Image (cartoon, helix red, strand yellow):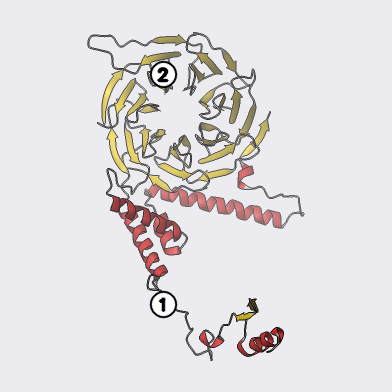
Amino acid sequence: QHPVGEVTRKHMAVRNILPCYIFGGRIKVLSRNPDDYVRETKLDIQRVPRNYDPSLHPFEVPREYTRALNATKLERVFAKPFLASLDGHRDGVNCMAKHPKSLSTMLSGSCDGEVVWNLTKRECVRTLQAHEGFVRGMVVRFCGTSFFTVGDDKTIKQWKMETPSYGEEEEPLNTILGKSVFTSIDHHQKEGVFVTCGQQVDIWDEQRSSPIRSFSWGVDSFSCVRFNPVETELLASCASDRSIVLYDMREATPLKKVIMNMRSNTLCWNPMEAYNFTCSNEDYNLYTYDMRYLDKPFTVHMDHVSAVLDVDYSPTGKEFVSASFDKTIRIFPKDSGHSREVYHTKRMQHVISIKWSSDNKYILSASDEMNIRLWKANAAEKLGLLAPREKAAVNYSQKLKEKFQHHPQIRRISRHRHLPKSIYGQSKELRVMKEARRRKERNVRKHSKPGSMPVVTEKEKHVVTVVN
């Protein structure tokens, strides 16, 4: 009987109503009574809306928070990453190599010879005297049938992977005599081509005794060279003039060179992202670059308190592990500036070489005191077969920890790591020095002419120039 507008205005005025909707001539009004949720005075307690659905618990979030807190505490209780020590060497272990086809086979080269390991049995399968003096580098051929080694005696040797039969002599398949000491070697992912570095970067064909191509760019020596696992024609090297040089096998000259403030020791390509690589530097940091934009690294990874000697990516490309002169191993997420994990033991000395296993579960570290150590990549992970209920519980705990990871109490427990006294003291000292530098810079800028002291970001500080 009333016009629509009058009814709507009347209802809205009386009941504090939201606009009405008309369906087939009827008026449906969304109404909300303020008496249900507004306090009469400030002294009243807050009225909480109640859900009467029995499947929804009123304290669901507090319950989940408690479970997440307990799961985080238990993770730290069960964090026992050290698994085994392989002690067959008689001198410091200088380099390691993974087998591309077998998870349980691993090679290690020391300052006196060479060993092939079986990780499942944790025992030495085969020992051979590969070089006179240090074994500087080693790599397994992409098919896994043979491996190459380089040493201080200026030779490249190719060896059979199979153990020689009874009475058979341990002889290399092929020996190439070079003009200078080789410091590193790497093999192509698909072809019979390998690369070495020393005074220059040489690309070799397995069938020839002289390099098919050589690169040098005004550098007296190179410390490391690596093929890109995705774009297999690309390679990169670390040079003694503090530079990182990029090459294309199909080109006659190097592509680019980025010069940093301090020397890079080794580098490793991301196996999932073709253009990204991470280098370990003498200034205690690691730098992740995109090879297309070398003006500055897109992440600086800080936490070590001494020179970083080696780096290796996980097969997923999401994390990498670094070995340092400060006697620790650290695991970094690829886009994080700080490590999520630090491993150390009382007996472990300067860690020279590091490898992440191809199944993403284990880490192998080689150090000065003649030992190779086997670690879990996830410190609190339970090894062996899990029952379906165990798997479900682990996954549920993981999701809860992710959901509440930024809550102060949970973050504090999950981030806490026990460090040796010397490393704790050094890291504290480095923090104080860095803050002092920042404060001095701020004060100088404050009392200088505007614009005379531009702000230089942490990423830009460490790169000197890029040469094309």
Measuring from the top left, give residue 328's x and y in whole percent: 40, 41
Within 10 angstroms of label 1, few (less than 14), some, or many (20 or more) residues? few
Which of the two residues, 429 or 336, is positioned nearer the viewer here? 336
Within 10 angstroms of label 2, few (less than 14), some, or many (20 or more) residues? many
Measuring from the top left, give residue 275's x and y in whole percent: 58, 34
Figure quadrant of the N terminus: bottom right
Which of the two residues, 446 or 324, is positioned nearer the viewer here? 324
Amino acid marked by disc 1: Tyr
Q: Which residue is mark 2?
A: 149
Q: Quadrant of residue 222?
A: top right
**Residue at 66% from the left image edge and 47% from the top image edge:** 456
Which of the two residues, 393 or 18, is positioned nearer the viewer here? 18
**Residue at 42% from the left image edge and 20% from the top image edge:** 141
Measuring from the top left, give residue 42's x and y in whole percent: 53, 89
Q: Which residue is mark 1?
A: 52
Q: Secondary structure at mark 2?
A: strand
Q: Nearer the viewer, mark 2 or mark 1?
A: 1
Tell me how far mark 2 sits from mark 1, CA to CA: 72 Å
Measuring from the top left, give residue 207's x and y in whole percent: 48, 9
In the shown orientation, is residue 438 left or right of residue 56? right
In the shown orientation, is residue 216 left or right of residue 382? right
Figure quadrant of the C terminus: top right
Amino acid marked by disc 2: Thr
Number of marks in the rendered image: 2
In the shown orientation, is residue 325 left or right of residue 120? right
